[in-house]
Image: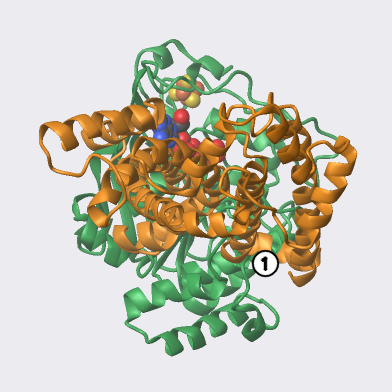
Amino acid sequence: MEKILEVNDLHVSFDTFAGEVQAVRGVNFHLNKGETLAIVGESGSGKSVTSKAVMRLIPNPPGRIKEGEIKFGDRDLAQLSEKEMQKIRGSEISMIFQDPMTSLNPTMTIGKQIMEGLVKHQNMSKSEAKERAIELLKLVGIPNAEGRINEFPHQFSGGMRQRVVIAIALACNPRVLIADEPTTALDVTIQAQILELLNDLQEKMGTSIIFITHDLGVVANIADRVAVMYAGKIVETGTVDEIFYNPQHPYTWGLLGSMPSLDSTDEELIAIPGSPPDLLDPPKGDAFAPRNPYAMKIDTEMEPPLFKISDTHYAATWLLHEKAPKVEPPAAIKKRMQGMAPSEPIIGAKDGGKNV
Amino acid sequence: MGRYIGGRIISMLITFLIIASLTFFLMKLLPGTPFNNQDKLTETQIVQLNDKYGLNDPVPVQYFNYMKNLLSGDLGVSFQQDGREVSTIIGERIGPSAYLGLQSLVVGTIIGLFLGIIAALKHNSFLDYGTMVIAVLGISIPNFVIAGLMQYWLGVKWQLLPVAYWDGFAYTIMPTIAIASIVVATIARFMRTEMLEVLGQDYITTAKAKGLSSTAVVIRHTIRNASIPIITIMGPLVVGLMTGTLVIEQIFVIPGLGEKFVNSILTNDFPIIMGTTLFFSLLFIVVILLVDIMYGIIDPRIRLAGGKG
Ligand SMILES: Nc1ncnc2c1ncn2[C@@H]1O[C@H](COP(=O)(O)OP(=O)(O)OP(=O)(O)O)[C@@H](O)[C@H]1O
Ligand code: SF4
Ligand SMILES: [Mg+2]
């Protein structure tokens, strides 16, 4: 499998008046060609900061990439100059943001907003760019594209705006698309349409996607692999099947337990107790320990390394250490693990194993 | 849009008539008559003059006559200047005032926008703090103090510029600075806030994520959106500018409308007071309408709402 993007030991901090907020603390992940990697985690776990760091869009000050490598082809994005990054942004790596109501310029026609990138990266003339913009609007499913190209964002509904945002992001055929909670602000039916559109476009254009969300239900619909993030670190990563049917990290159990699913009418949703740690002063040991009913003594003293479960599946929890006591995951999770048949409970799941 | 403007013009006319009436009655409350401070006149002469100008009629009758004349476009004649037409006097005086006002507005707006943009782009730097100090000074120091200081240093001490009067471009520089200082300060501060606000918006991140250069992001996406709200303060700013002109024209002895207005109040020259007040009011009302229309043209969201209404 060809890796298109590889992030190694990424650290991002924000220098605030209160001190250094360590938003991302040593993140490792990679993205294979043509696949969709979902990054999931609670609010504040550092998903957006990680993705903005890849685009080098962390505002500085107060933010800075402290260390780490962002390998894209043979280049390290963490080291590129702003000018070089501008050539990559929007042409090789693009980004879609959470709220389509605010991510479009309210005083510029959507046509112009799509054309900007084309003119900049592909040296198109105005008329060529306009033609391509109309093509793109059709591609993302906006009816009457010719007529609507001169309209302003407020003349579109939320779902339609997100389609416009997707058109902007895909304008130059980027190799990587980072979607930061692209459906969170939309209502459920529109969400499904946008997910379908993204799946569709990925098939047509072969784009690799990093899909950020805190909704595991969405993950099942779109991702090939999943990285679970907690307090600025990736605590478990694996294929969709591995994460859904054989989760190893108690935090992943918590996330899965708090996810409503169609077959869970008889079970209660379990919320993860407590709240994420203060990243101004991250705890020693495992950051999840204070919220973890399975925590052991070592957890408060030493950070767990990533334990390998399979070639594609890793988790950072001492529970996987050979000397750790055997613990049972919560009943609901166990039930899922026992019935480990991908086609069963998750409706509309992508063929999770296809890229492994 | 057409219906919207039509409605606005009707409400403007009503506003104007209300202002005219209010001014009329307020003026009647001024102590004295236009003639009693001219010691040379005898009692009988004053009575005769009052009769001639209808000042002995009951106030409602005077009001009725005044409004009737006003609606037929007649502003009356000056009491002090041998019965010359008020409209002629306003016409003579408007030139220097309009020139000074426009020059101050244009220069002040350009400098203010420039400072505000620089301050925001260099947020929390020396340039930012420097600009804000200028802005605070510009707002807090009254323009007549600035005028006085300039007259003393630039005019008298260093003899760089003429101290007063109205005789060519050099004479406009100090009054323009004095009047424009508040414009510069207000706009710089406002623009800085708006720029910072816009720079934090999601669509700016979108623009950056497209790979646009920082210059393109600032010019195409930031400045335009940041300047839209500026238009809303242009109305009050122009009003402040006009009142500023009243004092500044006095200080620099500029033969403008402001100077005439102040003197007409001192001499109870009722028709001139009425005429200039109404003239200024009309100007305000028109400026505010223009600002609203401009807002609608620049901001597409309002354009739509206007089209519906
Ligand atoms: N400009 C900033 N200044 C200081 N701290 C910041 C800044 N931006 C982000 N952070 C901190 O970084 C941490 C991670 O934030 P991030 O936005 O990446 O979370 P997230 O996982 O995307 O959450 P959400 O699901 O809410 O989008 C948070 O603790 C946040 O407080
Ligand atoms: S390492 Fe310890 S605290 Fe951390 S998740 Fe595993 S068991 Fe819980
Ligand atoms: Mg986020």
Q: Relative to A166, say whether A133 is above or below.
A: below
B104 or A134: nearer the viewer? B104
Q: Quadrant of residue A159?
A: bottom right
The image shows residue A53, relative to residue B130, as above or below, that is: below
Q: Colour of chain A?
A: green
Name the element at disc 1: helix
Residue A30 versus residue A162 in the image, above or below: above
Nearest the camera: A216 or A280?
A: A280
Residue drawn where x is 36% and y is 70% of the image: A91
Position of B19 with respect to B143 (left or right) is right
The residue beneath circle 1 is A160
Q: How many marks?
A: 1
At label 1, the amino acid type is Met
Could you say which chain is coloured orange in the image? B
Q: Residues within 10 Å of mark 1 (few under 14, many from 20)?
A: many
Residue closer to the observer: A335 or B83:
B83
Picture coordinates of residue A5, whole percent (x, y) = 33, 58
- Residue A355, given in percent of the width and then of the height, sits at 47, 64
Note whether residue A14 is visible: no
Chain at tag 1: A
Is A195 left or right of A3, judged from the image as shown? right
